[in-house]
Structure formats: structure tokens, C-alpha cells
Image (cartoon, rainbow, N blue to C red):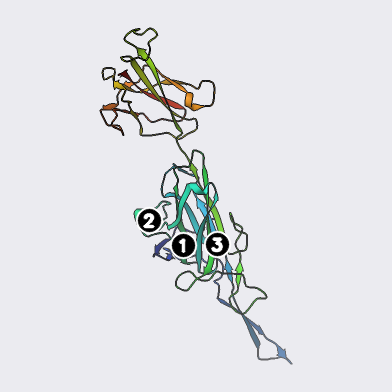
């Protein structure tokens, strides 16, 4: 639970110092404080008031160690190949003393091979996203001198691999472990004081169980998650003979001089993310010549016949004679010097097929 407003901080290459813009509200009496109780006994002897008898007792307040880590916001949608995808957390010191917090992350769900470079950064302005300056300050591994009841915002980033597919999830757990404050850098880990109460400052671990940690262990954790929204693009290219020099358009055959129409159908699968900046590039065989009179048509409709089986290699695409003129022809622009046809398609939402089609003559 979040207990205070966002605090500002400054970070060096190795340490973070969190400072409050308002006075911190103590979570109970400060550890190390002395509590003194005085007692006075008055009495009389024979009706005469005697000198009071007094005594006092003093004890030292022990350290109650408590930390809360909270994932802020909902699931973060990411794309395959996205870098520095962000999820935000709050780390709150609920102890009655200033402490350091060792920070660590762990992938607790998802395929490890498809997520990389998980790092923690200080979110100095608390806006739940990293600025160029915050990224430039570099990643952090601990919080230094976090005051009582202070909340420090951090952002965890990760790179999503291109191999991630639509619907993949990655669960990233942030853990903050309480350490001794007061010295430069990260202090020693705080552990529970064993045995009877001592005259000094004892440690009592008061934290609850987190996402991956047990209760009363001096740490807390929470889990944020990424959800991959990917396009699932497939393409089917088919050809049909339109006419030949002997038969015309009646049962034409693929002989030299025949006109052939290529149909390229691009489909985005059901449930996939919208594909943007879709561009089709087709290198023509040297055995055909592009039909510049017919031209190139894009964003047409097409049907795909799967031939009654699950093998996509024998699918057949049939383009309707719709769409709009567009695309470009470039002589010799292919990788091996082939002529090249290309054209953009409008953004492809899920469950959508768009086509590009053109014609050639067999040499």
C-alpha cells in the first residue's frame, strides 16, 4: 500500500539517496529513542509528610523493519522487438527507522530467452515513465537512506525479443530487501535479533509475505507483467494464366507470350495486433516481363483456398479485380538484378486480408 506522496531523489552510478519534499510521518516511535518512565511514592509517618521516594525506568525502542513493494498500473502491452519496455513500482519504507533497500528483479513467468536486459531505474519525478535524463542517470541496484514512511518510485525496463509471439506474457518480480543505513553505499542486511530483548536496538522483522517472499523476512516483492501483442502475418502468392497467343482467353496455357496474373494475399490472423507499415516487395523471375499497361493494384480483396488441409505451402490465393492503382516497378532493383514490383498495403487489423496483384508476360 502506498503511504506517502512521491519523493524526489538523486542517483549516482552506484547509489541512490531518496529525500522527501515534506516532513516524513513516523511509523511509530523512532528506533533508538529512549523511553523513560518516572515514578514517585509519597507517604506520611505519624501524620508527618515524609520525603518522596522516586525511581525511573528507561528502555530503548527497537527497530521494526517493514517494507512494501507495489506494482503500479496494469499489464503493459509490448511488441516483439520492443526495447526498454517499462513497468512501474513504488517502494515504501514502513519501518520506524531509516534503512537502505537492496533491489533485485526476477523473471517469474514467461520464456527467458525472449526477454533481455531487465534493469531498474529511479523514476525521479514519479510520473511512471522514464525521461532521457532518468535513463541517462543509469540503472540502480539499491536505494540509499530511505527515510521513515518514504515512498520511492522506480521503473523496471526490459527488451522483448523478436521471437516473442502474440499472447506471450512475461512476469517480472521486483524485490526490496532491508539493509542497515548510515554508511556510504549499501549497508549490511537487517536480520531479526535472536533471543531476549537487549538494552540496545534490536531488529524485529515485521513485513508481510510478498509475491515471492515469506513474511517476517525483512523484504517484500510484487510482480508486474508484460503482454505481447504481435501481428501474425502470412502471405500466399499464386498465379493464373489470363491469355496466350494461340487460345486467347479460352483455356489459355503458360506458353511464351502468355499473360500471367500474380496475386499476393497478405493476411493478419485472428486475435493478432494490427500490422502497420505493411510493404510488399516481389522480385520477378528473369523469364517474365512486367506488364506496365496493366500496372499494379494494392489493397484489393482476395480469397484463400487451403486445399482442404493444414499445409500452408499449397494454399491458393485468388485476387478480386478490385483495389486501387499503386505500387512501383523498378528495373533491375532485385537482389540479383531482377526487376522488382513493390507496393504498400493499408494497416492490417486482425482477421484481415489485403492483396497486391499485377501481370507479366512470359518471355
**Which of pointers 1 and 3 lies earlier in the amino acid sequence?**
3
Question: Label 1 near label 2: C-beta < 8 Å?
Answer: no
Q: Where is residue 28 in the image (x, y as percent from the top left)?
A: 56, 67
Of tags 3 and 2, the one toward the viewer is 2
Location of residue 347 with respect to 25 vertically, above or below: above
The answer to whether mark 3 and mark 2 are in CB contact below 8 A is: no
Please tell me whether mark 3 sits on a helix, a strand or a loop. Answer: strand
Instruction: Provide residue 277's location: percent of width, then percent of height.
Output: 35, 34
Q: In which quarter of the image is the C terminus?
A: top left
Residue at the spot of label 2: 135
How would you rate the neighbour count of disc 1 (Cα within 10 Å): few for under 14, some for 14-19, many for 20 or more?
many
Q: Where is residue 70 in the image (x, y as percent from the top left)?
A: 52, 54
**Residue 214, disc:** none
Q: Residue 67 carries which label?
A: 3
Quadrant in which the N terminus is drawn: bottom right
In the image: residue 296, left or right of residue 13: left
Furthest-right residue in view? Answer: 46
Of the pair 244 and 227, the residue shown nearer to us: 244
Q: Is residue 105 above or below residue 305?
A: below
Q: Residue at x 33, y 11 (%)?
A: 244
> Which secondary structure lies at badge 2?
helix
* Residue in the foreground of this view, choosing between 313 and 351: 313
Element under label 1?
loop
Q: Which mark, by number, is residue 141?
A: 1
- 332 or 317, which is in the foreground? 332
Specify whether 277 is left or right of 71: left
In the rendered structure, which disc, 2 or 1, sits on the residue that comes first in sequence?
2
3D distance between C-alphas at marks 2 and 1: 14 Å
Amino acid at each position: 500500500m502506498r503511504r506517502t506522496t512521491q519523493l524526489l531523489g538523486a542517483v549516482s552510478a552506484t547509489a541512490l539517496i531518496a529525500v522527501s519534499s515534506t516532513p516524513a510521518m513516523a511509523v511509530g516511535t523512532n528506533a533508538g529513542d529512549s523511553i523513560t518512565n518516572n515514578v514517585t511514592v509519597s507517604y506520611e509517618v505519624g501524620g508527618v509528610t515524609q520525603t518522596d521516594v522516586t525511581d525511573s525506568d528507561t528502555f530503548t525502542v527497537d527497530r521494526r523493519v517493514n517494507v512494501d513493494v507495489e506494482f503500479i498500473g496494469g499489464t503493459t502491452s509490448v511488441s516483439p522487438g520492443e526495447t526498454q519496455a517499462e513497468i512501474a513500482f513504488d517502494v515504501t519504507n514502513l519501518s520506524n527507522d531509516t534503512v537502505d533497500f537492496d533491489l533485485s528483479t526476477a523473471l517469474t513467468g514467461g520464456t527467458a530467452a525472449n526477454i533481455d536486459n531487465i534493469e531498474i531505474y529511479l523514476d525521479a519525478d514519479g510520473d511512471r515513465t522514464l525521461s532521457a535524463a532518468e535513463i541517462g542517470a543509469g540503472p540502480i541496484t539499491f536505494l540509499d537512506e530511505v527515510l521513515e514512511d518514504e515512498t520511492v518510485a522506480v521503473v523496471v525496463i526490459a527488451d522483448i525479443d523478436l521471437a516473442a509471439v502474440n499472447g506471450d506474457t512475461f512476469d517480472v518480480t521486483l524485490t526490496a530487501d532491508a539493509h542497515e543505513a548510515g554508511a556510504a553505499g549499501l549497508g549490511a542486511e537487517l536480520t531479526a535479533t535472536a533471543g531476549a530483548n537487549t538494552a540496545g536496538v534490536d531488529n524485529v522483522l515485521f513485513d508481510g509475505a510478498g509475491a515471492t517472499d515469506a513474511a517476517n523476512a525483512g523484504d517484500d516483492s510484487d510482480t508486474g507483467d508484460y503482454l505481447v501483442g504481435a501481428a501474425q502475418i502470412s502471405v500466399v502468392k499464386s498465379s493464373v494464366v489470363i491469355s496466350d497467343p494461340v487460345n486467347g482467353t479460352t483455356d489459355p496455357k503458360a506458353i511464351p507470350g502468355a499473360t500471367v496474373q500474380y496475386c499476393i494475399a497478405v493476411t493478419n490472423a485472428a486475435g493478432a495486433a494490427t500490422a502497420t507499415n505493411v510493404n510488399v516487395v516481389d522480385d520477378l523471375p528473369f523469364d517474365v516481363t512486367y506488364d506496365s499497361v496493366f500496372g499494379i493494384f494494392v489493397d484489393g480483396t482476395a480469397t484463400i483456398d487451403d486445399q482442404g488441409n493444414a499445409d500452408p505451402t499449397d494454399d491458393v490465393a485468388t485476387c478480386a479485380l478490385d483495389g486501387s492503382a499503386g505500387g512501383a516497378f523498378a528495373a533491375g532493383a532485385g537482389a540479383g538484378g531482377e526487376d522488382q514490383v513493390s507496393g504498400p498495403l493499408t494497416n492490417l487489423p486482425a482477421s484481415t486480408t489485403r492483396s497486391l496483384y499485377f501481370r507479366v508476360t512470359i518471355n
